[in-house]
Image (spheres, coloured by chain):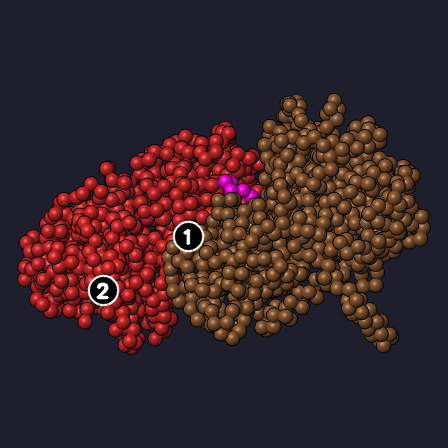
Chain colours: A brown, B red
Amino acid sequence: MKINIIYIFATILLAITLKAQTEKLTSHVNPFIGTGAIVGSPLSGNNYPGATVPFGMVQLSPDTRNIPDWGVASGYNYNDTTIAGFSHTHLSGTGVAEFFDVLVMPFTGDIIKEDAGTNPYQSAFLHKDEIAKPGYYKVDLKDYDVTAELTATTHAGFHKYNFPKNKSAHIIIDLDHSMKKSDWNTRIIASQLSFPNNHTVEGYRIITGWAPMRKVFFHAEFSQPIIKNQVTDNGNLYQNVTIINGTALKAILDFDTANADVLVKVGISATSVENARFNVQAEIPAWDFNATVNAADTAWEKELSKIKIEGTPDQKTIFYTALYHTFIQPNQISDVNGDYPSADFTTKNSAKPYYSTFSLWDTYRAAHPLYTLLQPERSADFINSMLLHYKAFGYLPIWQLWGQENYCMIGNHSISVITDAVLKGLPGIDAHAAYEAVKNSSLLEHPGSPFGIWEQYGYIPENLKSQSVSLTLEMAYDDWCVAQMAKKLDKAEDYNRFLKRSQFYKNLYDKQIGFFRAKDDKKQWIDPFDPLKYGANGGYPFTEGNGWQYFWYVPQDVKGLIGLVGGNKAFTQKLDTFFTLEDKPQEVNDNASGFIGQYAHGNEPSHHIAYLYNYAGQPWKTQQYVSEILNKMYNTTSSGYAGNDDCGELSSWYIFSAMGFYPVNPASSIYVIGTPALKKATIQISELKSFTVIAKNASAKNVYIQSAKLNGKAYTKTYITQQDIVKGGVLEFTMGGAPNKKWGTGADDRPENIIYN
Amino acid sequence: MKINIIYIFATILLAITLKAQTEKLTSHVNPFIGTGAIVGSPLSGNNYPGATVPFGMVQLSPDTRNIPDWGVASGYNYNDTTIAGFSHTHLSGTGVAEFFDVLVMPFTGDIIKEDAGTNPYQSAFLHKDEIAKPGYYKVDLKDYDVTAELTATTHAGFHKYNFPKNKSAHIIIDLDHSMKKSDWNTRIIASQLSFPNNHTVEGYRIITGWAPMRKVFFHAEFSQPIIKNQVTDNGNLYQNVTIINGTALKAILDFDTANADVLVKVGISATSVENARFNVQAEIPAWDFNATVNAADTAWEKELSKIKIEGTPDQKTIFYTALYHTFIQPNQISDVNGDYPSADFTTKNSAKPYYSTFSLWDTYRAAHPLYTLLQPERSADFINSMLLHYKAFGYLPIWQLWGQENYCMIGNHSISVITDAVLKGLPGIDAHAAYEAVKNSSLLEHPGSPFGIWEQYGYIPENLKSQSVSLTLEMAYDDWCVAQMAKKLDKAEDYNRFLKRSQFYKNLYDKQIGFFRAKDDKKQWIDPFDPLKYGANGGYPFTEGNGWQYFWYVPQDVKGLIGLVGGNKAFTQKLDTFFTLEDKPQEVNDNASGFIGQYAHGNEPSHHIAYLYNYAGQPWKTQQYVSEILNKMYNTTSSGYAGNDDCGELSSWYIFSAMGFYPVNPASSIYVIGTPALKKATIQISELKSFTVIAKNASAKNVYIQSAKLNGKAYTKTYITQQDIVKGGVLEFTMGGAPNKKWGTGADDRPENIIYN
């Protein structure tokens, strides 16, 4: 028996090893995708090319501007030609710039008397001298003839700088580098640099900005002795100090590089210098840079191997880069010893990793459902982190950053994430504790969540709370989630209360014009109404979208929505108009891009809409438009995304859609079938179980499903369940160049029959 | 043997008890002294009348303005006629407003729809309806017919509100109340209110202001159930919430007061809500308001009993109020369990109390020397707190607030405090660790302390660092302290280095004009120089004073100063001019007040000057001017101080001077004799040992020392040592109405012979 088990494991290991030798999935990742602005658009994907490990705290990446603002929120813009330095924390794909902590920059030559607010040490660079792959980044800094290489662990960055021989070598550590100070009241409240010995620099900064108050502690070890230090702080100069406190600290360190590279290991912590030190010493005990590069690569290879695909080289590049971007966050911000910065501004300890960076208005849609399939254990940790946040803060996170709430965007979509995970039965989540958090977060009024007027009016009156139409629609969806959890836990009264609330969306439907539109607290429609007019983040009933885009936001009750417009025909006609109406008003805002008619793939409100044809018996149109989006809105260039990747949300859309399905209702355990673009995709459910989607004859032209089989049996449903996937099996499509207008059109084949009953 | 000991203790106890019955020292304290502006001056003493215990964290006191600014830095101005509420933390006598945490205000009647930034619930009050005594405050709030009583423990405030029967009773808890938001970048970064049950409110605020980043946690328990709550936050209204986060939180609580008072116990912590809860539950376990009032009174009685005096009723009032003000701070900011907010923005734990509020530019002069006599154990705790600050921050505190450095004023005068305590041999201080901190803080450049140019130029050039003359003089003094510690610890090299630096003051003496004045980095005098012109806190060579006042700042080497001006005669003539020259330029700044000629008792730079006549053989002039200051600059009204009390510094001057001596050089263990104003003063050195100063024939007219005896032996020295005092004994003066121009004039009688050798 013992021998048998060993034999089985050995065989598995051998199989894994052989597979790894034949195809390195990390080789398909191109971290430059999403790093460069589309010409004529402010959107760049806002990804960064630097080094990070899956779900790590540290993202060690070049910043191409001294003062990043929202236009270069990841710190790096592919169109830029200079590098200001390498900072340790970044956000991937957000529309707001934040982090950029502990900037490190090597340079040579004279030290320039610094002017406040500028960094005279930035260097030109060329893309031809750059290499970026998962967990590794390299660039030549032209001004100094320095080659910089970066790699990372969960809590630490590892720098390798090759200086030219016999030139004066310096490294600057800049604690002042941050998002533009005038944005979000950004201010460094306090910071410290200390030099406990000639190989070490430690310190921290306390900074207020998009996150209310971040503490960032670090411990940096150098492979070469620091010969001299000088620190500037708001025009003051300190030479060879052992410790200094200030608010704009920059240390210039001198090295003797007659013979060697200078390597720097930097541990980061949100709780203390001691923990930063322990983090880096635990994760990078030696000076073996390549070993850390290899470990990062292995970590990525392991995560990327959750899905194996067959497809064109470009498809592989887009797909694995998307998977890479999806696995960059949420970020573990607890230390190796479990200390983490609690939402109530104290330090707490957790035996399990504590995660942050929850861009939930974006990621509840596709990224979190994808995590339930590919990262079930981490999904539980994400949710348990949200529950700890709830315990300290009173309600679940909305947009959680460095462990803190910033209230960005609308709704309470952690409710969707938690409901989804609980209904899918993910292990490691206390369903009753989760329900308490979900329910309380749906009853307790808090910023952006006016539940009093919600229950009083049955909608949000725009004159009482702006973004009212978007709020009404999204709150109704969240309430549906609460109802489903209540149902699962046999809480009938709660179920009825929240199910009723989930129908409030109907109260803002104007039958006369066929749109959701704003009312005031007198129940009067607010005039004028233009369904093409965009709102941003306040002062208008729609959030980062217009009336056309938000019309479709009833994922919990598409059947009801179809009923409102008068049936399937009217519904599909309206969809046809939506995807073809090119009129755009002047004020299309920065968040709208990637257009097909009124559909804007560059932002989340549109993301589920192409899949809605299935609900009304025209799945071939879903196939048509999903295929068009897959082909038009993603590519392998630095402009590879149609808009901000939003912490992996645009990436997750691609991953699902390219495999052939998408979670229109993200908490329903149901995926709506679109059009598989990959010849084959195998999701590794567990070591011995997988789910494979095969698309016979799939090609750029053959985007229409002709027929399907699930585990060998004919399959006509236009959706597939989580259960179908996680029990393993094969879903085989046969594709063709012309629509099969019969497949999937039966009344029983439509997704709403299973989702909403 | 056993019986004997018991007998002795019983006798002592009986004696103490009898004494307490005969004279209640707390009855002499008038907390309204220093609370009201002198007409025509912005200075008010800046004391507050509220409830606090000795060295406690909590100061529960009425705030007479909604938005306190520097003009009402203690929160209370005796000239005001309304009370905005009762907040839990205050500074006593500072020139900057800060704290005012967790404002509580009872009111009745309708709840007014609040306008942002205003508090519509303030109430009129009359001084006739006020009572203030140590640990207790009472006022009638006219607008609401509510009687408010307050008392406190170290970490908690205890409120008792008597509401009129059958009126709607409310209590507001205001977390937005703070110093004026436009001052010091004050901003509430985050705050939370929670209502875990109907008797409890908890929460915190994170605020940046004069202290870079304070966390203030609280736990409030109510004797009556909270019937209803409503919370506002920047115009948002939340009703009956269980928890809410925001940045301008104000909760209005409703009570049924048909039959009873509403009592509120509020624990405060700088580290966590849990600790705030534990603090109040440990210190106020019951609902017995009077018990807490009595405990506070007992605590004050114990501390005030450190000195027993005989004198006029006014003398007793001024003296014990001064002693009260001196014992208000430094404040213990560690929790009952020892947690404290470390200077590096982490939470640490200390077995001994951790103290904060070190207004050192003020208090190193007289308050800290006084603590060495009256609070030797706490003195050691103060210094050990400074050493923990040093450990976390790299250098000793300059102005330490809520555990944090705010760099207010100049110099590093914790060095003086530490040197004084170590040289006096106070137990509980590790002299070697203390010396390391003192030395490193004197070598490591840090904000305000440019030691590089100090050693390079031998003075501070004004064009490199402003306030250069004051800095040069004060740094030279601090360096003398370091030298004395080095000497004590047999560090000859250090001794020589710092002794040399302590003489740098001479490098700014201009013989031509007989003043210290500024040079630039080319060693050129900076023109024009006007010894009457005032500087404030930057942009001028003098700090909160003028050339006349700073001329005398060489406490470490008065002999050297006398030498610079050409001997005793020239020195005393210059002193005569100083005390009689009435010319004041227009720009006399806000810190200068309480004038006798150029002498300004309202601010610290002048404080030692009247004692300098002793050094040059004219002690009767010291007696004359000290007597004049004692009589003119202190009284029993709300305008009882000539300027800001500065955390007890003006008070400490009075205590020392009224007893007859003052620490001109605060780290010398030497007190210079002035003129005893009290008939008798007994300092309790220990349970069985005391030191008594008797002034026979002392009166308002008899201010001149005719003769003196120490322990029965004739005494002609114009100083007395710490050793003389702490070994116990009697110093007896005979006073008269005319100067005895012989007493104390011998060369050996002068203080510098013992201080500087």
What secondary structure is the stretch in magenta mostly built from? strand
**Along the line of sight, the residue nearer the viewer: A423 or A508:** A508
Which residue position holds label 2?
B504
Q: Can residue A230 be seen?
A: yes
Determine the secondary structure under disc 2: helix
What is the residue that sits farthest to the right in this orientation?
A: A713
Query: Which chain hosts label 2?
Result: B
Q: Is residue B615 left or right of residue A543?
A: left
Q: Are marks 1 and 2 on the same chain?
A: no
Tell me if B208 is positioned left or right of A16 in this view: left
Residue at image position (24%, 59%) is B522
Magenta segment: B245-249
Mark 1 sits on what residue? A116
Residue A371 marker: none
Q: From the viewer's side, name the closer residue of A413 and A193.
A: A193
Where residue B99 sits in the image (x, y, percent)? 41, 47
Question: Which chain does the residue under circle 1 lie in?
Answer: A
Q: Nearer the viewer, mark 1 or mark 2?
A: 1
Say which residue appears at 90% left-offset and 41% top-offset: A740
Q: Amino acid at mark 2?
A: Phe
On-image quarter of the C terminus of chain A: top right
**A242 up-or-down from A77: above or below:** below
Say which quarter of the image contains residue B568: bottom left
- The percent coordinates of residue B194 (x first, y second) are 56, 44
Vertical position of residue B416 compared to residue B488: above or below? above
> Is residue B171 magenta-colored?
no
